[in-house]
Image: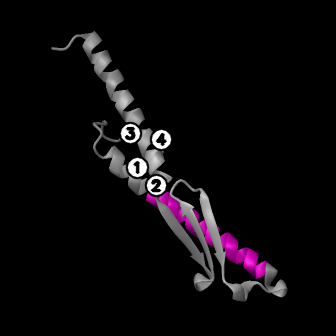
């Protein structure tokens, strides 16, 4: 049977390993790209799974002064679409990372 000191040391090592894996997962999330789309592809937003916006693409046909409100709505929709996809990619990556951890049943990591 392990002594209390050995058990504490093992728990600390496990916590350090989890911390390192979480840090690596955050780095990985910033390399995964998603694209949000609205208006049937007229407006596109590229973002990382961490939610960092990489770029916006607007079809030339939308740049009409009278359609400014519609263009703003489409950009907002594309950003929201990109954010949803970033969240999904982030959750999938974090699930992969946490699936190998020896966590108690029902324990949830704060993602």
Q: Earlier in the sequence, mark 1 or mark 4?
A: 1
Q: Earlier in the sequence, mark 3 or mark 2?
A: 3
Residue under pointer 1: 94
Dot 2 or dot 4, earlier in sequence: 2
**Label 2: few (<14), some or many (≥20) within 10 Å?**
many
Image location of residue 99, percent across then percent down: 30, 46
Residue at which label 4 appears? 110
Residue at disc 3, secondary structure: helix
Q: Earlier in the sequence, mark 3 or mark 4?
A: 3
**Mark 3, residue position:** 21
Task: Give neighbour class at mark 4: few <14, some 14-19, many 20+ (Cα, 10 Å).
Answer: few
Q: Is 105 placed left or right of 48 in the picture?
A: left
Can residue 8 be seen here? The reply is yes
Can you tell which of label 3 and label 2 is closer to the viewer? 3
The answer to whether residue 53 is left or right of residue 105 is: right
Disc 2 vs disc 4: which is toward the camera?
2
- C-alpha separation, residue under disc 1 versus residue under disc 3: 10 Å
Judging from the image, what secondary structure is the residue with disc 4 in?
loop
Magenta stretch: residue 75 in it? yes
């Amino acid at each position: 049977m392990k002594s209390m000191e050995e058990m504490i040391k093992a728990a600390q090592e496990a916590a350090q390993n989890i911390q390192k894996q979480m840090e690596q997962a955050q780095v990985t999330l910033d390399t995964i790209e998603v694209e949000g789309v609205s208006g049937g592809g007229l407006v596109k937003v590229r973002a990382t799974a961490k939610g960092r916006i990489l770029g916006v693409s607007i079809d030339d046909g939308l740049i009409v002064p009278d359609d400014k409100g519609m263009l703003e709505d489409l950009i907002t929709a594309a950003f929201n679409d990109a954010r949803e996809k970033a969240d999904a990619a982030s959750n999938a990556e974090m699930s992969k990372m946490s699936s190998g951890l020896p966590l108690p049943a029902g324990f949830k990591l704060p993602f």
